[in-house]
Image (spheres, rainbow, N blue to C red):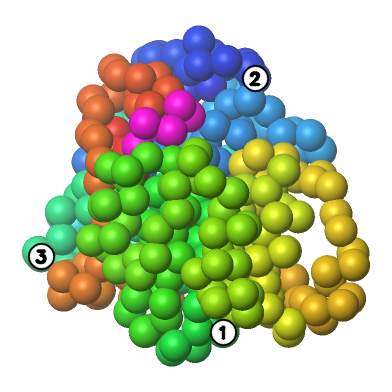
Amino acid sequence: MRVACIVAHGGIENLKLQDWPEPKAGPGQAVVRVKACGLNYLDIFVRRGMPGLPIELPRIPGGDIAGIVESVGDGVDRSWIGKRVLVDPHIKPYGALGEHANGGLCEKIAVEGENLIAIPDNVSFEQAAAIPIAFGTARRMVMTRGQVQKGELVLVLGASGGVGVGCVQVLRDIGAAVIACASSADKLERLRRLGATHLIDYSKEDFSKAAWRISGKKGVDVCINFTGGDTWVPSIRTLRPQGRILTCGATAGYDPKEDLRYIWVREITIHGSNGWRREDIEWLLTATSEKRFDTCVDRVFPLDQAADAMRALEDRQILGKVIVTP
């Protein structure tokens, strides 16, 4: 079968098309013919190499996998065969497909049978493959870790990416007011249509000052920042007393400058959020089926253009999700 795999850490040139043997379903496993695979920034980090997290190479990236079950091993209900499924990327006891094990940039993959989730009839493979890692992470961060409530004012940095558009829509669903930050008028207009209440073009103005103005100089209730880097301290300055900051990543740097004065004076709470749970994926599938959630599939690439798909994500040419179809 054809695969797109990372052969060495570094640039996009290290993602190569190769021929690999087809997988077999072992005990407790199912073989899924991949119909769509969603990419996430996690895949870029895996390709670049992450300090303190060795990755066995070659590695097939892509944790968000939708397809059709072709065969099952012992211990897996044979009624799964022929069904349209989304794969929960979680690996026990921790980790994700595409990072700690091979992912879905391939034609077939063997996965644990307990990770199969049926796709509703009116949800496409591409829509399903957009959901797990980014949108599942967004929902858990907002609902479980952040406990965001109806009527709260929430600032979302990086709102045009996968996690960002997920946050905007989950916040809209619970009745929160959303300040969305992005770098172009086109992206901001699309975020407005997804439910953002206020818009900030951070390429033209200081988002911290703009958020302070929008909040009536009271500060926002919640700031969602999975960017890190030089956005961290300005994010803390946007918060009201007893405000909280939510983070699930650090795409611009994991060791930012800190300003403890704001944290103790305003009694700010920082909540970390790591990944998703199955119930988040199931909620999102249902919401997508009911047209309450837009998976924001921006572009779809064939497998032989997987490098172009990853480049589009890395260069931030995407609003929402990029999908690869083997």
- Give the CA separation, mark 3 to mark 1: 32 Å
Q: Dividing the picture into quarters, in which one does residue 293 lie? A: bottom left
Q: Which residue is mark 3?
A: 121
Tell whether position 317 is magenta. Answer: yes
The mark that comes first in sequence, 2 or 1, is: 2
Front residue (pair 300, 191): 191
Q: Is residue 266 above or below residue 88?
A: below
Q: Dividing the picture into quarters, in which one does residue 16 lie? A: top left
Q: Is residue 238 visible?
A: yes
- Magenta range: 313-318
Of helix, strand and loop, which mostly describes the magenta segment? loop
The mark that comes first in sequence, 2 or 3, is: 2
At 42% across and 77% down in the image, what residue appears?
177
| Residue 237 in picture, x, y percent from top left | 72, 64
Q: Which mark is residue 9?
A: 2
Q: Is residue 134 visible?
A: no
- Give the CA separation, mark 2 to mark 1: 38 Å
Q: Which mark is residue 183?
A: none
Q: Residues within 10 Å of mark 1 (few under 14, many from 20)?
A: few
Name of the residue lying farthest toward the bottom: 150
Helix, strand or loop under label 3: loop
